[in-house]
Amino acid sequence: MKALKVIYLILFLSLIVLACKENDPVSPLDNQSDAVPEKQNSSPKNITVMTRNIYVGTDVDRLLMAEDPEQIPLIVTELMQMLEATNFPDRAVSLAQEIAATQPHLIGLQEVSLFRIQSPGDFVLGGKSPAKDVLIDYLDVLLQTMASMDLHYEVAAKVENFDIELPMVTSQDPTFDDIRLTDYDVILVKKGIKISNVEERNYRVKLTIPEMGIEIPRGYCAVTAEINGMKYRFVNTHLEDADQGGPLLKIQLAQAAELLIRLAKVKIPVILVGDFNSAAQDEPTYRLVTLTNRYKDTWLLNSSVENPDGFTYGHDLDLLNTSQKFWKRIDHVFVREEMNIKGLELIQVTAEVIGDEILDKTSSGLWPSDHGGVVAELIFEKGCK
């Protein structure tokens, strides 16, 4: 408990420092002063949102745990074999079916991956030419799959996070190709919805591994969307994984703090979704969002009682487990609807976890992701002043 208090004290001081930066560029978030459209009436207003970590498809953390840099090319080879086995085009069909079944207005996607190759590679020779030939673009595959199902969504915002290139063994000679992975967080919006004030930003604090020359930035993207006569700030993020605690937890908390500072300036309802890598209801970053900054965890307001735990993680990384293995809730939909909007009330929430039932598996027996997604319908009403 004392350790947690120290963390919050440090975090509080960090918030003050971040808030007082004189040279920080003005964000589109800073100018969100239009609370609701002028012709707002008193009838209920609903919005349906989804958060979905679609999974990179391989165990990238193995690279971070490598004890010898000379192991890297063989590890990359094994990871690419796993990537092929987890078959994103097949999984994209199941992901698109989830969207077809729930029809969200806005979707926050995490781990949207772009794999590129250079063959033969120049990495082991000290070359610096980046790989450019596309192996697979998850966003393109998903959008094409959705279009084939008559689902009309557009990319509203897209933030690039880490961009890593490493060698892969291709023969016993040995010969090498270079594999490049670029990670994105993406917001999809149903076609026809008006959006504005797009923001795509990386956090200042990031994981660095100097001995491997690797940096792991994280970020968020945000849009203002007008739906059923209401304006909402919709924000999607993927925070650093802090399962190991220690320095990683400090990074995660700093990233969350930076985002919350920016959102504090928004004067319309904020819907904050993503993979927070912080489990409800006791882990520090979750508590920072819900207790310190007064965001509501919509799962706790859920009118459905079919799945009281709401766990969203984690299937086996090969996606072949025969039964659902979720054991914690780290994918969240938070809402801060009351700020500077006198009389506005969130009157009902209906939320469900997706990707957690056997029927959600692909025809080849894969789960759609190692995570489940969350779909929440939020109903707002303008009450008495």
Image (cartoon, grey):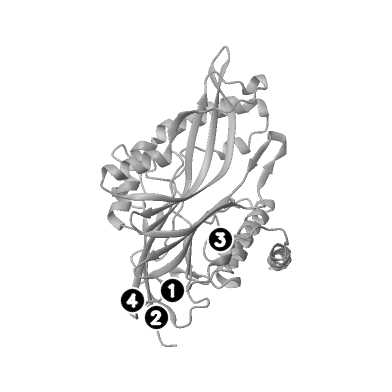
Residue 350 visible to the viewer:
yes
Mark seen at residue 28:
3
Q: Which residue is mark 4?
A: 44
Q: Secondary structure at mark 3?
A: helix
Q: Residue 172 appears in which quarter of the rendering? A: top right
In three-dimensional space, the C-alpha distance between marks 1 and 4, rounded to whole angstroms, equals 14 Å
Mark 1 and mark 4 residues within 8 Å of each other at the beta carbon: no
Mark 2 and mark 3 residues within 8 Å of each other at the beta carbon: no
Q: Residues within 10 Å of mark 1 (few under 14, many from 20)?
A: some
Mark 3 and mark 1 residues within 8 Å of each other at the beta carbon: no
Between label 1 and label 4, give the one nearer the viewer.
1
Q: Would you say 314 lies left or right of 209 here?
A: left
Q: Which residue is mark 2?
A: 382
The residue at the far bottom in this view is 385
Between label 3 and label 4, give the one nearer the viewer.
3
Q: Give the percent coordinates (x, y) of residue 108.
A: 44, 54
Location of residue 330 with respect to 125 vertically, above or below? below
Q: Give the percent coordinates (x, y) of residue 191.
A: 33, 54
Q: Residues within 10 Å of mark 3 (few under 14, many from 20)?
A: some
Q: Give the percent coordinates (x, y) of residue 13.
A: 74, 66
Mark seen at residue 36:
1
* N-terminal-most mark, 2 or 3: 3
Residue 319 visible to the viewer:
no
